[in-house]
Amino acid sequence: MSMHEFEDLVEASVKLFANSERPTQVLRALYKNLFDFQAQFDTGFTHFRTLDALLAARFVYKLELCDHPDYESAPAYFDALSDFTFIEVPGGKPDGSFFEPPELFYEAGSVLWQRLVAEKRLTGPDAEAPASLAIQDVALDAARLAAEKGDVQLVACWYRLLIYELLDRPLEVVRTDPSVLALREIVAKTRALELKMSYGMLRDPDAETLAKNRFIEWWFTLGA
């Protein structure tokens, strides 16, 4: 079953950033890293929830089917498409593009995007790959914006779900990370951990887990 808590977190964060004054290239990087984070977990394909925002930031692009670089070599394949699908030309591999009638879409940084850049069909800022960001930096950026807007639930969701990306890292490293420390300050100030959540990975750890895992105990004890 899909982990909806991560899907909803990314959707809410995309909408939050889309309504901010972040430059296009910054938004492209934020969106890339949000969806990379989501992909770490058992989640579905959710781009269509926020497609307008993704297109506006030029993180996702539209392309006519006939303009795909492989159309001339496999016209029957493309012409037969009638439902949503990820593009995989017979004899080839997925190129990161996806079809939703009547249009084809692809992400900045995908294999198809790389081909179009190499062919000079994408130039300038469009030919720049979205930057890779530390997920705790993305979480902090989202939490700051959410706190400014009074969205304590989004702050809480980020803090509760971010741990699953950091849990395998040494506690001594995480507890000195500037972004993590700044995020903990926001969580404490907004009292976000006081929101009771019982769904999936958002739920509070039980007493036994806190007692057995030093990292989790520190994460959920803001004064430590």
Image (cartoon, helix red, strand yellow):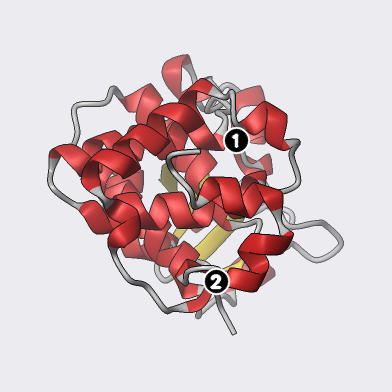
As drawn, 41 above or below 28: below
Q: Where is residue 166 in the image (x, y as percent from the top left)?
A: 65, 44
Q: Residue 180 carries which label?
A: none
Examine the rendered structure and indicate whether residue 93 appears above or below residue 14: below
Along the horizontal axis of the image, is 18 left or right of 111? left
In the rendered structure, the answer to whether residue 116 lies left or right of residue 92 reads left
Q: Is mark 2 on a helix, strand or loop?
A: loop
Tag 1 residue = 109
Q: What element carries label 1?
A: loop
Q: Quadrant of residue 90?
A: bottom right
In the image as oriented, which residue stretches furthest toward the left? Answer: 149
Q: Is residue 171 left or right of residue 199?
A: right
**Nearer to the camera, 147 or 58:** 147
Give how far across and how far down residue 52 sits, in percent.
27, 52
Q: Earlier in the sequence, mark 1 or mark 2?
A: 2
| Residue 114 x %, y % | 65, 32
> Residue placed at 74% from the left, 39% from the top?
169
In the rendered view, tell whether residue 176 sits above or below residue 64: above
Regarding residue 75, the answer to whether it shows in the image is no
What is the three-letter code of the residue carrying label 2?
Answer: Gly
**Count of marks overlaid on the render:** 2
Residue at x-position 69% and y-position 50%: 214
Q: In which quarter of the image is residue 98?
A: bottom right
At label 1, the amino acid type is Gly
Find residue 44 and name its label.
2
x, y (%) of residue 164?
Answer: 62, 55
